[in-house]
Amino acid sequence: MNKLLCVSGRQCVDALQKVGFVFRRQNHDHTVLRRNDPFAQIVVPDHDRLDRGTPRAILRQADISIEKFISLL
């Protein structure tokens, strides 16, 4: 199993935007991103450092592999 790097919410949003997610809205410290084909809507906390399980859950929802995510960073 690959180990995810320590990433911030902003880095995660930037990486997801590279694979087709677009900014929908921001509520306080959470950013909502959306992709139409295939449909997925993801909420990313805008924190300096995401907890260990948060990036894994985001990648599972986005159907992106860890290797691809690391290459997008």
Image: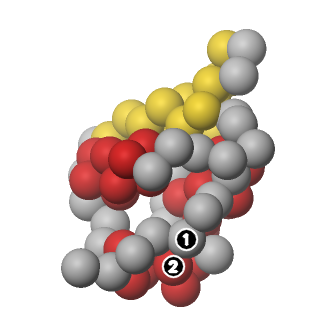
Give above or below for 43 relative to 7. Answer: above
Query: In which quadrant of the rendered view does residue 36 lie?
Result: top left
Q: Which mark is residue 5?
A: 1
Q: Is residue 38 visible?
A: yes
Q: Residue furthest top?
A: 28
- What colour scheme governs how the chains and residues are painted in the rendered image of this protein? secondary structure
Please report the residue visible at 49 percent of the width from the left and 31 percent of the height from the top.
Answer: 43
Q: Is residue 62 visible?
A: no
Q: Which mark is residue 37?
A: none
What count of labels does the image hold?
2
Residue flagged by tag 2: what amino acid is it? Ile
Label 1 crowding class (10 Å Cα cut-off): few <14, some 14-19, many 20+?
Answer: few
Measuring from the top left, give residue 61's x and y in whole percent. 28, 46
| The N terminus - image quarter | bottom left
Horizontal placement of 21 versus 6: left or right? Answer: left
Please report the residue visible at 40 percent of the width from the left and 75 percent of the height from the top.
Answer: 3
Residue flagged by tag 1: what amino acid is it? Leu
Q: Which residue is mark 2?
A: 70
**Dot 1 and dot 2 residues touching (CB under 8 Å):** yes
| The C terminus - image quarter | bottom right
Please report the residue visible at 63 percent of the width from the left and 59 percent of the height from the top.
Answer: 7
Measuring from the top left, give residue 23's x and y in whole percent. 63, 39
Give above or below for 1 relative to 24. Answer: below
